[in-house]
Amino acid sequence: MYMSPAPAKGGTGLDRARFAKLVVPILRHVGDRFGRDLFSSAALDMMLDLYVRDEHRPISLTNLSGAAAVPERTALFTINKLVSRGLLVRCPDPKDGRRVNVELSAGGLRLIEECIDDLLILLGER
């Protein structure tokens, strides 16, 4: 698994993890205000959910589907697209052989961190 380099820090100490944890409720708020039918970002919601978890631990497909606030079929379709593009990887659940977990791939982790770094630069935090 890809291990991220030292956290990016800016003038106010806003690092990647804190920034990502702020973005999640911001996206939910905008979706709630405008309506999910007009504003929805299932892939980003899921990738951020995986990113903000402690040590980027894998989670079940069901739990990840809940992070996107979209119908389960849409969430599974989005997960399949993220896997096919190499941004997520499926792995067997070590405690339950019937379940499949999902985690950020090395490329997915790198991409989300580069995106966060770019946004921090735009905000003048780097």
Image: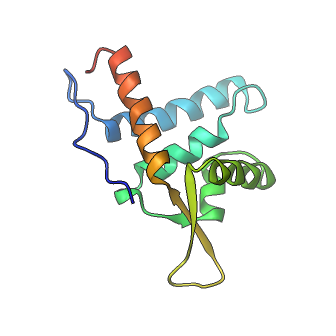
Q: Nearer the viewer, residue 116 or 86?
A: 86
Q: In x, y percent, where is residue 99?
A: 63, 77
Q: Which one is in front, 114 or 66? A: 114
Q: Quadrant of residue 63?
A: bottom right
Q: Nearer the viewer, residue 105 or 31?
A: 105
Look at the image and tell me in which quarter the C terminus lies.
top left
**Residue 104 placement (x, y as % from top left):** 49, 54
Q: How many marks?
A: 0
Instruction: State the image coordinates of residue 125 (x, y, percent, origin top left).
Output: 27, 20
Q: Is residue 94 left or right of residue 2?
A: right
Here the colouring is rainbow
Q: Is residue 98 above or below residue 30?
A: below
For image coordinates 35% across by 58% down, the residue present is 55
Residue at 64% x, 63% y: name it: 61
Q: Residue at x 62, y 72 (%)?
A: 100
| Residue at 49%, 64% in the rendered image | 58
Q: Provide residue 84's location: percent of width, then percent of height.
A: 67, 52
Query: Is residue 81 toward the left or the right of residue 103 in the image?
Result: right
Q: Quadrant of the N terminus?
A: bottom left
